[in-house]
Image (tube, rainbow, N blue to C red):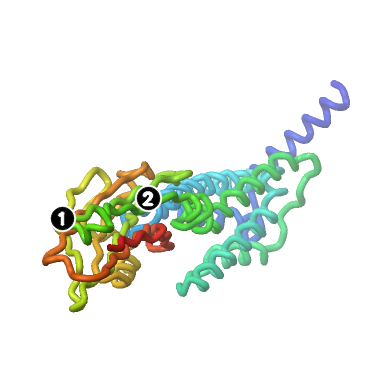
């Protein structure tokens, strides 16, 4: 038997003996194994609970990415825990930086919740700290770093997805649409300026997107508004007929989470009407809506005008106003 074969045989024998002996109770590695299993079970439980819709609607993309990362992180934790139980060199080398990742990620989540006005119990930070307080059971073995780095790097990437998920995948996040992505214009059939205000007027609004978000959900709202009165202060135009709805575009309806902003924008004009855009159905396709107005009384004498405005509201986060159109007679 060569020297290399003898060394390999001795290493394998030493590893089998270490596996049989197990971890010393209360050691860093033993505590870490218990903590990783607890965190894995909690992550899996969170994934299961996410299958049941909550009271508050949130971004579908965020829910999917967050829970996918949580499930994969549970796999990494279990692999590390079982590796520690068998005293695998790669797991022993990875345990300290892995605990560090858990502690940092947990601290960042606590800070994020606190900034959002909520309280989160730092159970993961407590578990990592409890494991660190245990005495080391074994020292990392040289040459076992590649698998250790992969385990720590994967856990850090998955933890980052969970910590920064709202900023990346939530409504208004990095991969969501933003005002520069929207192109929109309002039109109005003003008639002949020399003939005075027409009996009927058609308002139109067209929009399109330069990009689209993945797994869209929630509702946007379009608000058309008009302002114009006769010399007695009475509205120059009223709604003639309520427009019909189309797939994903619902006439006259409110839509979470854009309703409050739409209500405030509607009050900026003397008359207004709105459409709810269900993003899960409409999926950022180009859209067109029309509204018929009618002059309820005789055309007033003298000069008169109507100002038409249009605003697109995205998930109650931002509004983009189209260029105002003014009809003058």
Q: In the picture shown, does residue 144 fall above or below 315?
A: above
**In this picture, residue 217 sits left or right of residue 213:** left
Q: In the picture shown, does residue 14 fall above or below 306?
A: above
Q: Which residue is mark 2?
A: 48
Q: Nearer the viewer, residue 76 or 307?
A: 307
Q: Position of residue 243 (x, y in %)?
A: 18, 51
**In this picture, residue 5 sits left or right of residue 83:** right
> Which residue lies at the image location 60% right of the left edge and 58% below the top edge?
102
Q: Nearer the viewer, residue 57 or 186?
A: 186
**In this picture, residue 72 sits left or right of residue 272:** right
Q: Nearer the viewer, residue 233 or 289?
A: 233
Q: Position of residue 42 (x, y in %)?
A: 46, 56
Q: Is residue 52 visible?
A: no
Q: In the picture shown, does residue 316 fall above or below 234?
A: above
Question: Quick one: which residue is furthest to the left in this view?
Answer: 297
* Residue 18 position by quadrant: top right
Task: Identify the element where label 1 is drawn.
Answer: loop
For label 2, count other residues whose C-alpha is less than 10 Å away and answer few (under 14), some (14-19) or many (20+): few
Mark number displayed over residue 23:
none
Task: Identify the element where label 2 is drawn.
Answer: helix
> Which residue lies at the image location 38% right of the left edge and 45% below the top edge?
284
Quadrant of the image for the N terminus?
top right
Q: Position of residue 163 (x, y in %)?
A: 55, 58
Q: Position of residue 121 (x, y in %)?
A: 49, 70
Question: Quick one: which residue is furthest to the bottom in this view?
Answer: 232
**In this picture, residue 210 sits left or right of residue 278:** right
Give the CA separation, mark 1 to mark 2.
Answer: 44 Å
Mark number displayed over residue 242:
1
């Amino acid at each position: 038997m060569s020297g290399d074969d003898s060394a390999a045989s001795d290493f394998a024998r030493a590893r089998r003996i270490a596996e049989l002996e197990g971890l010393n109770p209360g050691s860093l590695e033993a505590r870490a194994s218990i903590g990783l299993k607890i965190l894995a079970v909690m992550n899996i439980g969170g994934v299961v609970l996410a299958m049941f819709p909550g009271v508050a609607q949130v971004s579908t993309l965020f829910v999917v990415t967050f829970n996918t990362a949580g499930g994969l992180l549970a796999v990494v934790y279990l692999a590390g825990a079982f590796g520690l139980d068998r005293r695998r060199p790669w797991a022993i080398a990875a345990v300290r930086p892995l605990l560090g990742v858990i502690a940092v990620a947990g601290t960042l989540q606590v800070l994020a919740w606190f900034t959002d006005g909520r309280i989160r119990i730092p159970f993961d930070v407590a578990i990592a700290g409890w494991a660190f307080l245990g005495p080391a059971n074994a020292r990392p073995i040289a040459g076992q770093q590649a698998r250790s780095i992969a385990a720590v790097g994967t856990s850090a990437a998955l933890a980052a997805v969970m910590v920064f998920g709202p900023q990346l995948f939530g409504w208004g996040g990095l991969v969501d649409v933003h005002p520069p992505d929207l192109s929109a214009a309002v039109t109005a059939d003003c008639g002949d300026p020399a003939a005075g205000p027409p009996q009927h007027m058609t308002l139109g609004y067209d929009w399109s997107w330069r990009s689209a978000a993945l797994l869209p959900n929630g509702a946007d709202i379009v608000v058309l508004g008009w302002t114009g009165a006769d010399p007695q202060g009475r509205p120059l135009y009223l709604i003639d007929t309520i427009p019909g709805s189309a797939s994903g575009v619902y006439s006259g309806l409110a839509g979470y989470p854009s309703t409050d902003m739409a209500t405030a924008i509607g009050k900026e004009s003397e008359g207004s009407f709105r459409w709810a855009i269900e993003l899960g159905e409409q999926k950022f396709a180009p859209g067109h809506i029309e509204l018929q107005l009618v002059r309820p009384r005789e055309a007033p004498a003298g000069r008169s005008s109507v100002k038409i405005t249009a605003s697109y509201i995205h998930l109650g986060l931002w509004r983009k106003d189209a260029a105002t159109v003014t009809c003058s007679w």
